[in-house]
Amino acid sequence: ANHAHAAAAAAAPRAFLHVAPARFLQKATEKALGRLGLAVAFEGVRVAFRARYEDFQLDAAGATRELFRALGLPPPAPKRADLVKLTPEGLSDLVVNFDEVAALFAPWPCLAAQLHSAKPELFAACASRDLPAPRNLSHSKGRGAEVV
């Protein structure tokens, strides 16, 4: 999970990863293509309310108010937010071979922008033309990342 109580987040040890760049790019592309597939599958479906996980990360109170309004419910009572993002650093602070990963992502600005983001941020879906072709992706048979 990428959220924890504030006290646990402050005490959590930092871990560094060595990431298999090609495997990481493959997984990012698969996720982006999956998101596009959902958009196509639900094209033409009337949507009364749309919320994204990132909406709640960036403005939990505002997103919740909008959800309640769409459901016809009274606004929720304000509550103290005691959740924090566990790793607010960018991946460049955590992945020991970040430059290698970033170089592989560079030809695809849509994915590269997400890779370089250092804060919760909402990104528009990548167009399929802005992603590497799945047939051109390969990776080693090993794990995608290891803790170092």
Image (cartoon, rainbow, N blue to C red):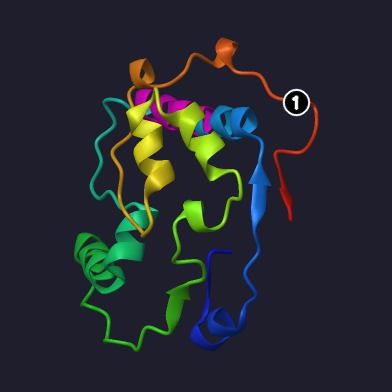
Q: Quadrant of the C terminus?
A: bottom right
Determine the secondary structure under disc 1: loop
- The question of residue 30 being in magenta is answered with yes
At 36% across and 64% down in the image, what residue appears?
57
Q: Residue at x 44, y 25 (%)?
A: 37
Residue at the top extreme of this rendering = 135
Q: Label 1 sits on what residue type?
A: Ser
Q: Is 44 situated left or right of 25 in this image?
A: left
The residue lying at 26 percent from left, 64 percent from top is: 63
Q: Is residue 52 left or right of residue 6?
A: left
Residue 78, image x, y percentages: 27, 86
Residue 6 screen position, x and y as percent: 49, 84
Q: Nearer the viewer, residue 118 or 42?
A: 118
Residue range (magenta):
29-41
Instruction: Note whether 36 is above or below 83 in the view shown.
Output: above
* Residue 11 figure quarter: bottom right
Residue position marked by numbered label 1 in the rendering: 140
